[in-house]
């Protein structure tokens, strides 16, 4: 620090002291927060990467060897959330793998095999297998990003692997619709019950669609519910599409994505 910077710091310190502003705060709340992040499968280096605070400082605070911390350090560490732990700037850095495993299993639940997932996320089939089956709590940031890329591409499109779907069903893997985006990376969170996960449906809009009217700004939950009811009444995909104003391929996609059986017989 230069002489000028030192004088500036001392002047600011005396001014803050005169105003009763402390430069440090107790470390206990920060230590508690760090322990919560560690329970969420964070690593000390990962927290350091995300917060910009040296890992040696974080280690001392987490170990109870530092009774106070500066306000700057406290603010930086308290801002770190469990979701931040999977956004390391270093692609080779390790992040919790729980969310990646859940994403792969959710894709299997809707019929995507390892080959599909690997191709959609620039992975190899071996990568997919190791992420799910290899011991350990962490994977590299680059692998986590690749799994997330595959999940974003495939989570609303059913796959064609009956084997993957059967394995997932036997193991009880929840599908993508059962996971809230804010919870899938949280080790303490669980999937939502399928009934709870279904969005609230506007009955007036559903009835309007089923009657052949096309309300402006129609949401997908209402369109899906109309498809569900018309299919149960025995309508064909072509007939449902004409009724709700979409093509039959869109109806087929919605039925497959939301597991709606066809009630039509030729």
Image (spheres, helix red, strand yellow):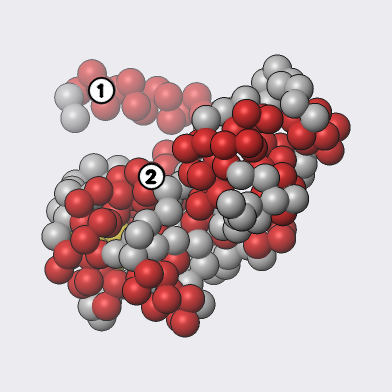
Looking at the picture, how far across and down is residue 186, in whole percent? 49, 61
Which corner quadrant of the image does residue 45 belong to? bottom left
Determine if residue 29 is in view.
no
- Check the image and name the residue furthest to the right: 204
- Mark 2 / mark 1, whichever is N-terminal: 1
> Toward the viewer: 73 or 41?
41
Residue receiving disc 2: 152
**Side (left or right) of 121 relative to 155:** left
Looking at the picture, how far across and down is residue 31, in whole percent? 47, 62
Mark 2 Cα-neighbour bin, 10 Å: few <14, some 14–19, many ≥20: some
7 shown above or below 152: above
> Toward the viewer: 80 or 21?
80
Residue drawn at 63 percent across, 52 percent down:
264
Tag shown at residue 5: 1
Residue drawn at 20 percent across, 72 percent down:
130
Which corner quadrant of the image does residue 159 belong to? bottom left
**Side (left or right) of 235 relative to 172:** right
Looking at the picture, how far across and down is residue 233, in whole percent? 75, 50
> Toward the viewer: 199 or 115?
115
178 shown above or below 121: below
Secondary structure of the residue carrying tag 1 is helix
Tag shown at residue 151: none
Determine if residue 13 is in view.
yes
139 shown above or below 244: below
> Toward the viewer: 254 or 194?
254
Secondary structure of the residue carrying tag 2 is helix
Mark 1 Cα-neighbour bin, 10 Å: few <14, some 14–19, many ≥20: few
Looking at the picture, how far across and down is residue 92, in whole percent? 15, 53
- Check the image and name the residue furthest to the front: 266
Report if the CB atoms under discs 2 and 1 are less than 8 Å apart: no
Residue drawn at 66 percent across, 30 percent down:
244
Tell me the distance, in whole angstroms, between the alpha carbons under discs 2 and 1: 49 Å
């Amino acid at each position: 620090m230069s002489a000028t910077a030192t004088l500036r710091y001392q002047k600011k310190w005396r001014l803050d002291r005169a105003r009763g502003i402390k430069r440090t705060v107790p470390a206990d709340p920060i230590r508690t927060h760090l322990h919560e992040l560690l329970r969420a499968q964070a690593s000390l280096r990962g927290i350091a990467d995300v917060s910009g605070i040296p890992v040696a400082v974080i280690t001392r605070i987490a170990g109870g060897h530092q009774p106070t911390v500066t306000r700057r350090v406290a603010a930086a560490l308290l801002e770190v959330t469990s979701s931040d732990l999977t956004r390391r700037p270093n692609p080779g850095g390790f992040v919790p793998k729980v969310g990646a495993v859940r994403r792969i299993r959710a894709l299997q639940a809707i019929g995507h095999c390892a080959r599909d997932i690997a191709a959609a996320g620039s992975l190899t089939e071996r990568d997919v297998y190791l992420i799910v089956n290899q011991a350990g709590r962490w994977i590299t940031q680059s692998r986590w990003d690749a799994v997330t890329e595959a999940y974003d591409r495939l989570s609303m499109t059913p796959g064609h692997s009956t084997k993957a779907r059967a394995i997932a069903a036997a193991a009880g893997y929840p599908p993508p619709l059962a996971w809230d985006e804010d919870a899938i990376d949280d080790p303490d969170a669980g999937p939502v019950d399928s009934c709870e996960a279904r969005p609230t449906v506007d009955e007036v809009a559903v009835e309007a669609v089923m009657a052949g009217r096309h309300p402006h700004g129609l949401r997908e939950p209402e369109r899906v519910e109309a498809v569900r009811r018309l299919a149960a009444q025995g309508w064909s995909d072509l007939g449902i599409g004409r009724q709700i104003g979409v093509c039959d391929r869109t109806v087929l996609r919605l039925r497959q994505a939301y597991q709606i059986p066809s009630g039509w017989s030729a």
